[in-house]
Image (tube, rainbow, N blue to C red):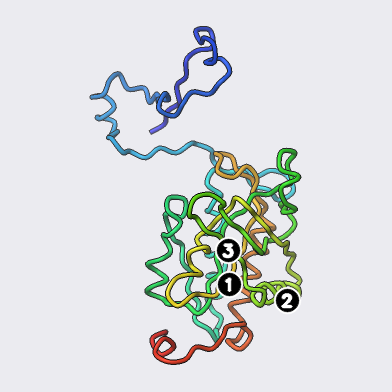
Amino acid sequence: IMGCIGIKAYHFAKGDERTQPPALDKLWIDIGAKDKADAERMGIQVGTPVTLYNPPHCLGNDLVCSKALDDRLGCTALLGVAEALASTPLDIAVFLVASVQEEFNIRGIVPVLRRVRPDLAIGIDITPSCDTPDLQDYSDVRVNHGVGITCLNYHGRGTLAGLITPPRLLRMLETTAHENNIPVQREVAPGVITETGYIQVELDGIPCASLSIPCRYTHSPAEVASLRDLADCIRLLTALANMSPEQFPIEPETGATQEARP
């Protein structure tokens, strides 16, 4: 059902109404219904989800614009890896997980972790690209410069955590990228958090890293990202999946915990 967000006509607006956006509880969506009963006949109920309409479209220099690139890009990366590995025998068990509720409580991945009990986890998400005039002093991450490898991120508010990538994992990611001619860029992102902040403290502690696809205008209905960076992310993940267990810098475990893992 299509609709538009209604707002008071400028001609009748007074004071701050002319310069300030209305509060969320003052917005309404016009779907052409005459009244409540008419809206219900159209299928609208309390709790019916709403999304902004912005079909994907291509920009210059291999950039794409769409809503919800956070985290459609991550899902697309997983699909690309699955396609690349479909006919390849592997020496390690690879689980590709598209979790939900990351934006809601940052813990949607937890049930899968407790079922799979991984030896290593690599999170895939977007990160703000800071090549626009308003963010040039925030970080050096830019679109079309390769997938980001997170050195550190943290939320900085309340009890929410962050990730400090273990140096050995950081070196492994950068070395693998270099050996496969995959462009990468380091990311340090205060104010940013993903589920990796909670993956690392699950179970007995899970070694954890994070790959980030640079994205402009994050959490807006018109995000912009690079298809090249997406391809680089897929290539790096595929290269990692083709490694042998001995190439991963993970401490061997002993005792019952090791025996319990698949």
Position of 233 with respect to 196 (left or right) is right
Specify the quadrant of the image occupied by residue 35.
top left
Q: Which residue is mark 2?
A: 175
Which mark sits nearer the N-terminus, 2 or 3? 3
At horizontal 73% and vertical 76% (from top left) the residue drawn is 175
Quote the CA–CA distance across marks 2 and 1.
Answer: 21 Å
At horizontal 47% and vertical 74% (from top left) the residue drawn is 95
Amino acid type, callout 2: Thr
Q: Which residue is mark 1?
A: 84
Which mark sits nearer the N-terminus, 1 or 3? 1
Q: Indicate the quadrant containing the C terminus: top left, top right, bottom left or bottom right.
A: bottom left
At horizontal 58% and vertical 56% (from top left) the residue drawn is 154
- Indicate the secondary structure of the residue bearing disc 1: helix
Q: Which residue is mark 3?
A: 163
Specify the quadrant of the image occupied by residue 212.
bottom right
Which mark sits nearer the N-terminus, 2 or 1? 1
At horizontal 33% and vertical 38% (from top left) the residue drawn is 48
